[in-house]
Amino acid sequence: MKLILLGAPGAGKGTQAEILSRMCKVPTISTGNILRAAMKNKTPVGIRAKEYVDSGKLVPDDVIIGIVRERLAEDDCKNGYILDGMPRTIPQAQALEEVGIDVDWALSLEVPDETIIERLGGRRVCKDCGATYHVVSSPPKTEGVCDTCGGKVCIRKDDAPETISHRLEIYHRETAPLKDFYETRGKLKSVGNMNTVDETTKAIVGALGL
Ligand code: AMP
C-alpha cells in the first residue's frame, strides 16, 4: 500500500492516516509532524521551517523533498507507506516521480471550506505527543490534559483564525491542482465528507478496495 492523502488542512488526513497505517501495517509519513518535531528540537530544518509553519505558509519544496526522501529510504517503508501532507505542490509531486517514488493511489478527502473552518477553530493538540482533540466532538477527559501522555493540550499556532483562511487559500491554489495531476495518471480516488471518523474510514476502505 503506497498511498498519498490529499485534502485541505483539517480534512482528517492525519486521523485517517493513523487508522489506515494500523490496518495496512505500513508507516505514516506526516511532513507536518516531522516539521513540528524538528522545530521542537531546534534542528537546522526546524529552525528554517518555523517561520513558514507558524504563519501557515508552505515550507520550501527542497526542504520537504529532502525530508521525505530520507524518511522513505528507511527500512520500515519497504512494504509501503502513507504520505500525509506531502506532496502539497505540483513540483513536490514531480520530484517524487523523478526520484522513482511511486504510489498506488492519491486519495482526496473532500471537505467543504465551512466545515474546515469549524473543525480547525476547535482543534487542540498535545504539545508533547501530537494527539489531536476537538473542543466539541472529541475533547480530552480533563480539559487541557492529554489522555494519552498527560501532556499539555493547546491550540496549534497555525490554527489561529486569521491563519486558517490563509492556509485554505494556499490549499486551493497550490495543493488542489494535484487532484488533476493524479487523475490524469489514473490514480485519483475521492471520498466525500462524512459525519464521523468511522464512516470516513469505511468510505476510504470501499474506495480503495481494502
Ligand atoms: P500539517 O500538519 O500537514 O497541516 O502541516 C503543518 C505545516 O507544515 C503546513 O502549514 C506547512 O507550513 C508545513 N508543511 C507540511 N507539509 C508540507 C509540504 N508538503 N510542503 C510544504 N509545507 C508543508
Image (cartoon, rainbow, N blue to C red):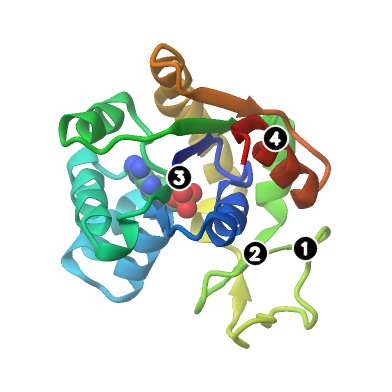
Marks 1/4: CA–CA distance:
30 Å
For numbered disc 2, what is the local secondary structure? Answer: strand
Give the crowd class for mark 1: few <14, some 14-19, many >=20 residues within 10 Å: some
| Nearer-N-terminus badge (2/4) | 2
Quarter assignment of residue 90: top left
Residue to which mark 3 is pinned: 1
**Location of the C terminus (image quadrant):** top right
Q: How many marks?
A: 4
Q: Is mark 2 within 8 Å of ligand 1?
A: no
> Residue type at mark 1?
Val
Mark 3 neighbour class, 10 Å CA radius: few under 14, some 14 to 19, many 20 or more: some
Q: Position of residue 194 (x, y in %)?
A: 79, 37
CB within 8 Å, label 3 to label 1: no
Disc sitting over residue 135 in the figure:
1
What residue is disc 2 on? 124
Residue annotated with mark 4 = 206
The numbered mark, 2 or 1, whose residue comes first in the sequence reads 2
| Distance (Cα) linking label 3 and label 1 | 33 Å
Cα separation between marks 2 and 1? 7 Å
- Which numbered disc flags the more N-terminal residue, 1 or 4? 1
The answer to whether one can see residue 55 in this image is no
Q: Are marks 2 and 1 in contact (CB under 8 Å)?
A: yes
159 relative to 83 in the view: left or right: right
Structural distance between the alpha carbons of marks 3 and 2: 30 Å
Q: Quadrant of the N terminus?
A: top left
Element at badge 1? loop
Asked if disc 1 and disc 4 are in contact, CB closer than 8 Å, the reply is no
Distance between mark 2 and mark 4 Cα atoms: 30 Å
| Horizontal arrangement in the rendering, residue 106 relative to residue 77 (left or right) | right
* Among numbered discs 3 and 2, the one appearing first in the sequence: 3
